[in-house]
Image: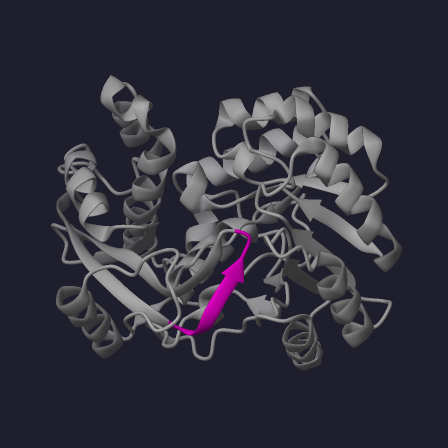
Amino acid sequence: MKITAVRSTPLAIPLERPFHWSSGHQLGANLVLWTVETDEGVEGYGESICEEPAAVEAYGRLIAERFLGRSPGDVESILGAVWREGRWRFTPHFSNQILSGIEGACWDAWGKVHDLPVAAFLGGRVRDEVDLMAFPQGETAAELAAHAAELVESGARVVYVKVGRPDAEDEAIVSAVRHAVGPDLLLRVDANEAWSVPEAIDRIRVLEPYGIDWVEQPVAAGNVSGLAHLRRSVGTKIAADQAVYTTGELRTVLELEAADVVVIGHHETGGLWRLRQLAYLAEAHGVLVNRHACMESALSTLTAAQAAACIPNLTIGNQAMHQLLAETLVASPAPVPFAGALRLPDGPGVGVELDREAVERAHDRYQRQGAYSSIEPVGGHT
């Protein structure tokens, strides 16, 4: 079986409600759906997250040239050919986001032709379910707490909230959410690089009485030595996220003992194959892995679950953000849970059937209005 074409479809999907984090708020998701076509009539589907689909499409067409004429199962060989070309090394993070969608589509096609789930090619499952966090949304502490109380009814064991906003209401938010969910659930917070090292030490010490399981990426991604110093200075566990997109970045974090857990996803690592490899590297250092989510559809969540199910050092409370979108691109399985246990589909490949009408609506929306801004004033386009 050979790849005959790689097609891209830009998408724009509104969110259920504004998404608030340390950089502002967001009203919609921009995605690129990749379709890998083969000479046996089998198609595979993958998804790239993005800020501007037009840029991803243009860059992706160049990368896709290395996939044409190859078997969709030749992932390691294809990735090697891509990275031997120096032009991709100048933008490794951006290139990885594009590669993740095309590579995921290859695995989907490869699994379909062999009538096997993608997990079978990534070492095999060590679990049939991936545990997902509860991710409450809202602008105020009261709204976040109320939503958190609703979500824990779904069976979630981990609640996750964003902190580090400019208005510095972190303690009020964490206090309200902790009170709403009770003392037993794990509570994790993510500052998205919002603090300097001294600020992070002070802020985390204020939050520690509320029983924080870990703080994700509290300082700038490039300041790994500062992250290590922070980890030695507080009692709460530290998670690295934006600091560990590539193998070299992860190696630095592990060597400096800068994190108790690494939060990584296939969109950042360049696909499921590299995600599995980075997870193994973390396991060799005795470090846990938490699956990272982005502003993505359920296609990405279910694609990532194929790799997550194969990772022995995976934590509970893995990230999911597909539920933030106002509509899903997935017709089956449905519904896709957004907290608690996500059971892997039984079908071949990723095990997903696309909602073709939803894809068409999202594509038409992008053609009419263009991409959503990542930071949008209230009242922007929908």
In the visual, does 134 lie left or right of 19?
Answer: right
Where does residue 254 sit, x and y in percent of width and height?
66, 25
Q: Is residue 20 magenta?
A: yes
User: Could one spot residue 85 in this view of the protein?
Assistant: no
At 38% across and 34% down in the image, what residue appears?
Answer: 93
Check the image and report above or below for 308 versus 344. above
Which residue sits furthest front? 167
At 35% across and 59% down in the image, what residue appears?
Answer: 115
Where does residue 257 sit, x and y in percent of width and height?
72, 25
The number of callouts visible is 0
Where does residue 379 sit, x and y in percent of width and height?
35, 73
At 68% across and 74% down in the image, what residue appears?
Answer: 148
Q: Which residues are drawn in magenta?
A: 15-22
User: Could one spot residue 271 in this view of the protein?
Assistant: yes
Residue 26 lies in what quarter of the image?
bottom left
Where does residue 16 sit, x and y in percent of width and height?
43, 76
In front of the other: 67 or 211: 211
In front of the other: 177 or 269: 177
Q: Main secondary structure of the magenta part?
A: strand
Q: Is residue 30 magenta?
A: no
Residue 69 lies in what quarter of the image?
top left
From the image, which quarter does the C terminus lie in?
bottom left
From the image, which quarter does the N terminus lie in?
top left
